[in-house]
Image: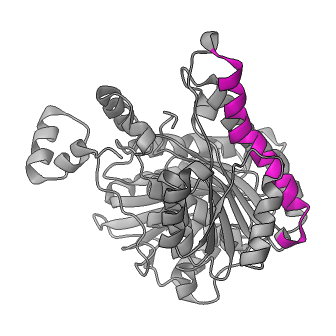
Amino acid sequence: MARDTYTELVNTPLGRRISGALGLPQPSRLRRHRPGAPVIDGPVALVGRSTVADRIGEVLLGWGLDVRRHPDPGERIAAVVACFDDVAAPGDLSAPVMELSGLLRQVGPSGRVITVSRRPGATSDPAARAARQGVEGLTRSLAHEMRRGATANGIQLAEDLDADAPGVAGALRFLLSGRSAYVSGQFLTVDTVNGELPRRAEGWDRPLAGQVAVVTGAARGIGAAITEVLRRDGAEIIAVDVPAAGEQLAATANRVRGTALQLDVTVQDAGERLVAHAAQHHGRLDIVVHNAGITRDKLLANMTPDRWDSVIAVNIESQLRINRALLASELFDHGPRIVSLASTSGIAGNRGQSNYAASKAGVMGMVSASQDLLGSRHGTINAVAPGFIETEMTAKIPPITRQVARRLSSLNQGGLPVDVAETIAFLASPSAGGTSGLTLRVCGQNLVGA
């Protein structure tokens, strides 16, 4: 993994002065999650007068946070939660937007702005949908304006969903915390009352205690980071990778005190073998993370059948086949979670990656279509789409291209494997039970695929 020496430099006093004088990007060190640390350090301003806003204020107070309806002018605040759930026409946006505008200069480094609104597609009223869609444009634009490592994201609620739904508190805590350090300009949807919040405060640090998680492609890189974060959050780990990566796989499994399974995910009985391993060694299976993936880049004009077929086989067909085996098993029947790795390449495309982009767009389509299959057993399926992440793969990009790609995000830097892992761990947690069929980008508001 290549070091981002520019970000390190501009976070020294001399580097900050030079980059400022030259008008160069000034990426900040991002606040990332530390077990035991407060969800956010500093006052949280609350904008809105709806019952949803009132309930969110109660939730924040219940976490011991300092909630302010009217912060003192000039007072440094850590976050703003702005509720737009009651807007019925575009004109209704003005008052809360102006209140939010007056608070932005007070948001500190690595601060958070979170908008809360209703899902646009949940209403057929043109004025209401226009207003709700307006909140999306507002939030995404604001994310581009945030500075010093701060982010802006949104939570969208189903039409009649009450703010007491566990998924609302789960989404709120994730977006406020350091777990979402590289998530900006994105929306978490909460559609149902499914999910469960920790009964004790310390449960937020170990939300996966007692659960068993499979991670494919776990030998190194993002896959290894996923195993470490899931283990930190309390899960028992089954680390899976191809036999050729056996030595690295064993090291990963040993590091997280899990079990290793050497398995090519493209074999016809891969799903059955995963289930059998979980039954024999752990007695249960709760979470499956489809991380295994390959690239075989080539311009479409020069594409060969082996390059196309191998990428499709590993990146999407294997997931479909394994999911069918999981859903046929009674072992995977108690609020199960599936999280798949997509990519921003599947959203924006990428030169020379038509096969990869097709496979990752396919992952997003599969996730969207499968939510009812998981919902019937109170489970969820979601995807995470990384952007430019500092991995062995992106370290091979030519240096100048790599530097440009880093600076194209709103946060002016690449993400880390742990940023992807934190988002996966959240989506796998009980508190995210109200969110399913979603693709959440972890890209710092960038569309450079990785």
Q: Is residue 161 visible?
A: no
Most extreme residue toward the top is 301
Relative image position of residue 36 (x, y in whole percent): 42, 82
Specify the farthest residue to the bottom.
200
Q: Residue 69: x percent and y percent? A: 47, 71
| Quarter residue 214 falls in | bottom right
Task: Work out whether residue 238 or residue 320 is closer to the camera in this orientation and state it.
Answer: 238
**Residue in front for this viewpoint, 150 or 101:** 150
The residue lying at 80 percent from left, 56 percent from top is 271
Which secondary structure is most common in the magenta stretch?
helix
Answer with left or right where residue 308 lies relative to residue 376. left
User: Which range is magenta?
Assistant: 303-331
State whether residue 229 is above or below residue 243: below
Q: Is residue 234 magenta?
A: no
Q: Position of residue 250 (x, y in %)?
A: 53, 64
Identity of the residue drawn at 60% across and 59% down: 424
312 on left or right of 106 = right
Q: Which picture quadrant has residue 109?
A: bottom left
Left-right relation of 353 to 370:
left
Residue 187 in sight in this render: yes
Instruction: Give coordinates of residue 9: x percent, y percent.
Output: 17, 47
Q: Image point 77% across, 79% down: which residue?
A: 283
